Amino acid sequence: MLGDKECYATLAVKDVQKAKSFYEGTLGLTSAGGSDDGGLMYKCGSSHLFVYPSEFAGTNKATAASWVVGDDLDKVIADLKSKGVAFEQYDMPNVTRKGDVHVMGELRAAWFKDPDGNILNLVNGM
């Protein structure tokens, strides 16, 4: 029923203006509409990310959104670090770490948080 329908990530934030600065300024996302009051929609490749105000912002303790960046993983990490983004370090079974990158066979991934503590992910493939 939903297998051929588009899906997008939805992230709760406490301060839409602060989130706007992070998602547009730091991550380089482009607005795809919305209003600062009700939330902001961003285009991410062929999908979207919706950021909206909520008192429950940052309460999710798991990955909320992932970007598949392919072979650009190390470059994207370096670019984000140059903008002050700190990367998370997680201990997981059968995972080794090389700097900020978690390695799981061919899969390489890195995690960071937005200003509200939403956990975001970069991955080299799916």
Image (cartoon, rainbow, N blue to C red):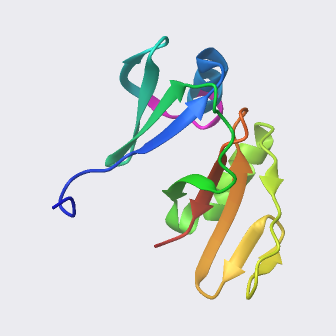
Q: Quadrant of residue 123?
A: bottom right
Q: Position of residue 58 (x, y in %)?
A: 68, 38
Work out whether residue 87 or residue 90 is closer to the camera in this orientation and state it: 90
* Rendered view: 70 above or below 97: above
In the image: residue 16, left or right of residue 52 = right
Q: Residue at x 74, y 69 (%)?
A: 101
| Relative vertical location of residue 102 with respect to residue 7 in this rendering, above or below | below
Tally of marks: 0
The residue depicted at 59 percent of the width and 19 percent of the height is 16
Q: Is residue 71 above or below residue 2?
A: below
Give the magenta range: 25-30
Q: Residue furthest front?
A: 55
Does the magenta run of residues contain 87?
no
Quarter of the figure with the N terminus:
bottom left
Q: Position of residue 17 (x, y in %)?
A: 61, 15
Which residue is at 60% across, 38% downward?
A: 27
Residue 103 found in image quarter = bottom right
Q: Position of residue 52 (x, y in %)?
A: 50, 26
Residue 26, magenta (yes or no):
yes
Q: Residue 33 at what x, y percent from top left?
A: 35, 21
